Image (cartoon, grey):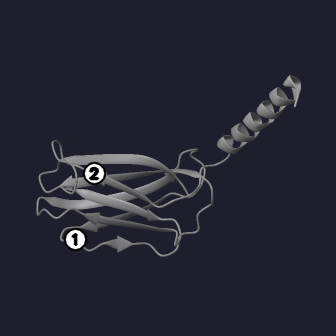
Amino acid sequence: MGKATRIGSVALAAAALISIAAGPAAAADKVVHAYLPGHSGEDWAGQGSWDDSANTLCVVVGDDDSHLKAVARIAPVSGTGPVYWLADRYPQTWRCTDNLRIPENRLYRMTVKVTQQNGNTYAASSRFYT
């Protein structure tokens, strides 16, 4: 194999890799935890989750009687498309939507907001693909 052929093969392989990387990310389940300041790990105040195979959004308030409500909201990052939200109140009940009619392979943002009985609020968010 000549030098020009090797360079051409490398260029083609690189172009294929770039085109694969530029496509939409694979959809997957997503979990977002909202924490009180100084807390981490399993000590979350609220949790939102997206189940990609069932297209369902779920939310649960953390296991602490100072947490009053948790709200999970998903919205397209582009600003165009359906927005969904769901709330849970203490004590924990794990509320979930039915199968949502949502466009596939779109970039969404999930935000989880927790309100405590004293009125303090805490939130976290993360992006994911549907």
User: Alpha-carbon distance for marks 1 and 2?
Assistant: 15 Å
**Helix, strand or loop at mark 2:** strand
Please state which amino acid type lies under the numbered disc 2.
Ala
**Helix, strand or loop at mark 1:** loop
Q: Nearer the viewer, residue 79 or 54?
A: 54
Mark 1 is surrounded, within 10 Å at the Cα level, by few (under 14), some (14 to 19) or many (20 or more) other residues, namely some
Q: Quadrant of the N terminus?
A: top right
**Residue 120 vertical position relative to residue 91 in the rendered view, above or below:** above
Q: Quadrant of residue 67?
A: bottom left
Q: Which residue is labeled 2 in the image?
A: 34
Name which residue lies at 64% across and 48% down. Answer: 24
Residue that extends furthest to the top in the rendered view of this protein: 3
- The picture places residue 114, in percent across and down from the top left corner, at 25, 54
Name which residue lies at 23% across and 67% down. Answer: 89
Mark 2 is surrounded, within 10 Å at the Cα level, by few (under 14), some (14 to 19) or many (20 or more) other residues, namely many
Q: Which residue is labeled 1 in the image?
A: 92
Q: Is residue 88 left or right of residue 28?
A: left
- The picture places residue 51, in percent across and down from the top left corner, at 47, 67
Q: Quadrant of the C terminus?
A: bottom right
Q: Quadrant of residue 69?
A: bottom left
Q: Nearer the viewer, residue 7 or 64?
A: 7
**Residue 90 vertical position relative to residue 80 in the rendered view, above or below:** below
Q: Is residue 84 left or right of residue 113?
A: right
Q: Nearer the viewer, residue 47 or 66?
A: 47
